[in-house]
Amino acid sequence: MLNLLTDIPGLIVGHATDLALGSGVTAILFDEPATASVSILGGAPGSRDTALLEPEMTALRVDGFALGGGSCFGLDAAGGVQAWAREQKRGAVFGGVQVPVIPQAIVFDLTNGGNKDWGRFSPYREMGYAACEAATRGAFALGTVGGGTGATTPLVKGGLGSASAETRAGYRVAAITIANPVGNPLVGKGPHFWAAPFEQGDEFGAQGFPAHPLSVEDLKLRAKGIQDEVDPPTATSIGLIVTDAPLSKAQAKRLAIAAQDGLARAVHGAHLPFDGDTMFAAATGQGEAVTPQVLTLLCHAAMMVTARSIARGVYQATALPYPGALPSWRDLFR
């Protein structure tokens, strides 16, 4: 296994990255429509087509997802992903019209130093299409790429991460995330990650957890803009969990909720008023939905791969090429 979302058969992942802009888009596309749902726990989310993912809504399956920067402007990206999917004859057909369903979530990266003077129309629709054109079934880059290009944390550069696991039931679970939180993924001022207990090998530096009891300073809320009453924090962590198990839409909802637990374990201060924390969940498996016992194993795995993915995104990130840009974890601790 690659320890990536592409460990789940039947999907592709692609990035579009613009370092001058300081932003980007990541597209995830399924070979066959996938059962999906969502959990939104942040106080300031930005999203597209999330209401239809609730279990009581009619739509059962989606054709892909877009994860990107740009805040509300970035929601144009799903249009580019949808255009590519339609060209590939993906999506349900209504009255002879192909309609791919591409839900999206965005992070706020408008004030990270990049050139956001793009003119009348934002570049995100074209970036969504370009991300599809670059999509692969194999290894893909992590860190300052795609939707994680402009991501930040309170102390170091944020980024795009991914992680995977296999349950004892034989099903795989994998995450792809963008770490751009109000809160802190590091214990105190670092270098340790809050996600350290879940680390596999040295996937985010093998720093372990602090050996000493955590101090008041370690537990202090180190958050973006928390002292600033004029300019609010610029944040949001988002992601997608995928399993190859067959799930009902209600079970996919439960998987998305479990992923939020992983976010809360990886970030000290999650689901805050200026976060938009949104986690999608999708299932590619066909046939009868799994039992509650198997779903429990999947939810446990979803929590852990989400926590690991958040930390990997920060660990793999590199600083943006602007004066005054946040340093990366590697700049400070390697």
Image (cartoon, helix red, strand yellow):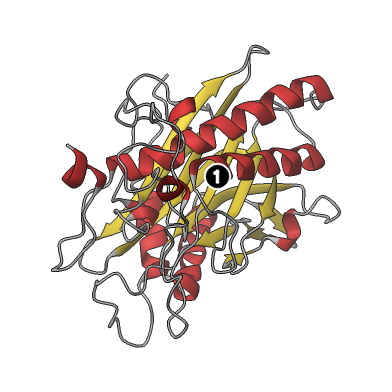
* Residue 322, image quadrant: bottom left
Tag 1: residue type? Leu
In the figure, is residue 86 to the left or right of 216?
Answer: right
Kindly identify which residue carries mark 1. 263
- The location of residue 181, given as percent across then percent down, is 46, 57
- The location of residue 11, given as percent across then percent down, is 51, 36
In the figure, is residue 29 to the left or right of 184?
Answer: right
Where is 218 relative to 45, above or below?
Answer: above
Element class at badge 1:
helix
Where is 326 relative to 34, above or below?
Answer: below
Q: Residue furthest right?
A: 56
Q: Total of numbered circles in the picture?
A: 1
The structure residue drawn at horizontal position 37% and vertical position 37%, both measured from the top left corner, is 312
* Residue 48, image quadrant: bottom right
- The location of residue 112, given as percent across then percent down, is 29, 69
In this rendered view, identify the residue nearer to me: 126 or 218.
218
Q: Can residue 142 be seen in this view?
A: no
Q: Is residue 274 visible?
A: yes
